Image (spheres, helix red, strand yellow):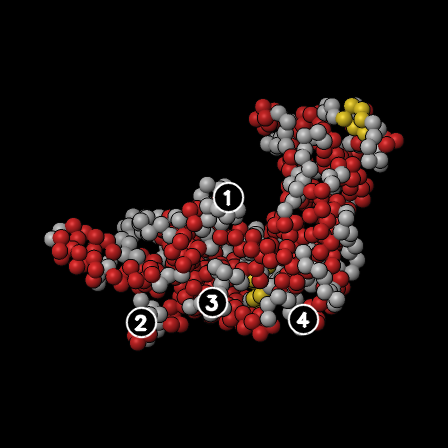
Amino acid sequence: MFNVRELCKLQLWLPLGLSLCLSQCLWRPILASHARLPVYIQRHMNASADACVDFYEHACGGWSLAHADDVYASQLEQLDYEYHASLAELLEQQPGPQEPRFVQLLRDSYVACRRLDKRYDAAQFVRWLAEWSRGETESETESASASERGNGSALIHLLKTYGLGELLQYENEEEEEEAEAEALSDAEQRLLQLQLPWPNPEDYLSDAGDYEMLTHASFRQLYPASARPSATRRPAYLSCVSALLAEQPVSLLAAYLQLRLLRLLQQLPAPAFGRQQCAAQSRQLLTHAAVWLLQQQVPHAQRHHTNDTMHQLFEQLRQQFKLQLQVNRNRFDNATQSFLLQKLQRMRLRVGVLPSGSPEQQQQQLEEHYAQLQLRANDYYGNLLALLRQTQRWAAGAEGEAADGLFVVQSDGFGSYASCFFLFSRNLVVLPHSLLAANLYRSHQPKVFTHSGLGFLLAHELSHGFDLSGVVYDGRGKLASRQQRQRLSSNARFANQKTCLKRRHAEIADEKFADLNGLSLAYDSYFTAHCQHKEATGARCGTAVQQHFFLNFAQFFCRDDLQPEDTSEHGSSRQRVNDAVASSQHFARAFGCERSRHKHPLCQLY
């Protein structure tokens, strides 16, 4: 059977007439296979790129041109963008007569955000920061816990989200470049020497007051000795002030941001948040209310069908991984094999972040969840303060979920909201409803696209339960016994494969394993189920369908290459796609790639 490269070579040596015949006859099935691809894949492809050299470019090289006029820069951002557009449209409608209170809270949050561009009350923001500082006073000593100091990171993230990141920037870039060589005490002195306008204390709570320069003594009052770092502790100075302040108590951070705001009053333009931004903010802080509202727009029968489809897909992936474990390449002892198989058997999938139960039960639980929260449609900063405090109370519950069992979803903790995630403490894979949308999912699409899209994402998260970090937790989400961990670590082949992953992929070893194993499970779960018998080959199992599988897999990672991306945890999109397919023999056969004899062997944990 000819592959694409062989046809190219053959045409170079044939007479023109025969060459044209080959083009019309032998190439037609290949061209026809692309013609049957979904339109979105054809739009995103760069068919001229060699799939064997740079598959990401082949599958996603046309993304930038296809979406040149769009505000989002990736497939992942597109899912969020469309989700927020739907949410904004619903929140701009008149409330219904039986609207739950938590939906009204969501609406108040959105309306207050949209009204902010009409009147920017800087003094109100200063009061908000002051109230935050007073309300969150902590034990600001050397014994302060990591969780107490972590509040600074949360506030910094929220300020950046709300378009106030300017408050965290340096004024002098040269000072930033020299900062790495300075001691922590020098950073403290830099803050103390700031000469910024400060309101007269008597007029502090008024909308407009007389301003005077902030003196060293004034700053000392604002920044008490108990909040300053100990002189005996001198870690290397962090590269920017925002990173330094992220480790400080909230009271210091709030005070610093007050100073920065007052300095920039004449420079900072009035925020003008759009529909998308306000919908995203409201969704971030009232996640479950937003999810509930959008879910109500989908007919119950359709939700039920989708839920069943996802659980069937997850079960197929789980059974495929079970077969992989049973091969026992590592020659684990019986106790370890039983530990791994029981963990896999206990692993569950939750479709959506809301708890299971009837719609009435879910609504009642959300009413109780938001019962203590009070928001107003004309108080944007007051709403932020109330939401931040409520979020802290929820997060103080069990790890990964609130005290009432609702998951505390954080955009900065799990990436985009349009992402699956795995909860180690629950041995649970969570699939947000925002992923159940085009182009990733359509209810009646061919199964090959479901397996290569959502199937890969679910298999990726399933694999995290067995990666270098996750395998030490048992089927109930508890840390495995010391004996079981010793059995794992003492297995020679398993230890070698762990070393292989760490040496080759360093800090992203867990993510790389999840990518490689997830793609393998997704491929096998489809083609094993549909192509076991010879009579099943052809439309479901031929080369064209195999190519479609890999092309659709890559779509989730398509993005505008001109836009920067965070590669610290997963690696770049191009790297992730190319690394995953380079390790697949099925991919090499589907695209006629010649596997290099010098290619590194695959690091395979199981």
Q: Nearer the viewer, residue 582 or 492?
A: 582
Q: Is residue 57 left or right of residue 70?
A: left
The label nearer to you, 3 versus 4, is 4
Report, in whole angstroms, how far the alpha carbon at label 2 lies from the one at label 4. 43 Å
Report, in whole angstroms, how far the alpha carbon at label 1 lies from the one at label 4. 38 Å
Report, in whole angstroms, how far the alpha carbon at label 2 lies from the one at label 3. 21 Å
Q: Which residue is mark 3?
A: 317
* Secondary structure at numbered mark 3: helix
Give the mark, 3 or 4, whose residue is nearer the N terminus: 3
**Can you give x and y, in whole percent of width and height, for residue 497 in the image?**
43, 54
Report the residue at 72% width, 65% height from top. Answer: 96
Q: Which residue is mark 4?
A: 359
Report, in whole angstroms, how far the alpha carbon at label 3 lies from the one at label 4. 29 Å
Q: Amino acid at mark 4?
A: Pro
Q: Quadrant of residue 250?
A: top right
Q: Amino acid at mark 1?
A: Glu
* Secondary structure at numbered mark 4: helix
Q: Nearer the viewer, residue 219 or 17?
A: 17
Q: Which residue is mark 1?
A: 565
The label nearer to you, 3 versus 1, is 1
Give the mark, 2 or 3, whose residue is nearer the N terminus: 3
Q: Amino acid at mark 3?
A: Leu
Residue 537, numbered circle: 2
**Can you give x and y, in whole percent of width and height, for residue 426 in the image?**
61, 62
**Can you give x and y, in whole percent of width and height, for residue 23 in the image?**
21, 57
* Secondary structure at numbered mark 2: loop
